[in-house]
Image (cartoon, rainbow, N blue to C red):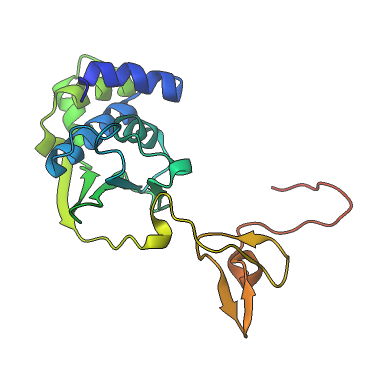
Amino acid sequence: MKTLPEYEQLAAVAHGHLCAGQILGLRMALHGLALLGLDDPTGAHRKRLVTFVEIDRCATDAISVVTGCRLGKRALKFLDFGKMAATFCDLETGRAVRLAARESSKQRAAELHPEIPEKNRQQMAAYRELSLDELFDVQWVKIRVGPEDLPGFKGPRVACAECGEGINFQREVVKDGRTLCRSCAGQHYYEPLSDHGPEDCR
């Protein structure tokens, strides 16, 4: 494992700048891995770790820098819960630990560094110094990671009976005897527009 300043440099490159959320994410990931006893997540332990993140903010990029977990490698799982939290799961042992940032950490930052007027800089300084207990709630949890969600899973690819698009990783839905993609089954996040070209999507 690298030092926090070393990870900060890597996070700044990966994210485009360094901010308080990234420092929080770095410390969250470092603590989660330490609790699991994984000290080489991008080397010897690379295939053991899956990380679930609950927010699409700066901390997620930082967590990825420490863990080596990436969405494209299927080792990073995004759950849009809107929480500054992540769960680190050791596939070999089955142990998993969820860390959530304490709401009180921002107030503690203000108390610790009242001389810094700018909130981001204030929190950056404090998040480097606050104890892990002041920063995070820790909970050991149980997570079922099915074979279809594992990195390297190679399952059958099926075609949607409605739109014809291919579906991977057993994400199809059987509805009224037909195999459908989630969009055609009514779970779509978009609304198709007319064939006459782009319209206002607001």
Residue 180: x and y, percent? Answer: 63, 72
Residue at 27% from the left image edge and 45% from the top image edge: 48
Instruction: Point out residue 134 in the picture as x, y percentages from the top left corner.
Output: 12, 36
| Vertical position of residue 70 compared to residue 153: above or below | above
| Quarter of the image where one finds residue 162 | bottom right
Q: Is residue 152 left or right of residue 65?
A: right
Q: Is residue 18 visible?
A: no
Q: In this rendering, would 142 be left or right of 193?
A: left
Which residue is rendered at x = 15% and y = 48% of the image?
138
Q: Residue at x 25, y 50 (%)?
A: 89
Q: How many marks?
A: 0
Residue 5 image-quadrant placement:
top left
Q: Is residue 190 visible?
A: yes
Say if 17 sits above or below 52 in the image. Answer: above
Residue lying at 26% horizontally and 35% vertically, measured from the top left: 41
Q: In the rendering, at what x and y percent does residue 132 appear?
A: 12, 35
181 to the left or right of 3: right
> What is the residue that sits farthest to the bottom in this orientation?
176
Residue 3 drawn at (x, y percent)? 20, 19
Q: Nearer the viewer, residue 100 or 7?
A: 7
In the rendered image, the quadrant that contains the N terminus is top left
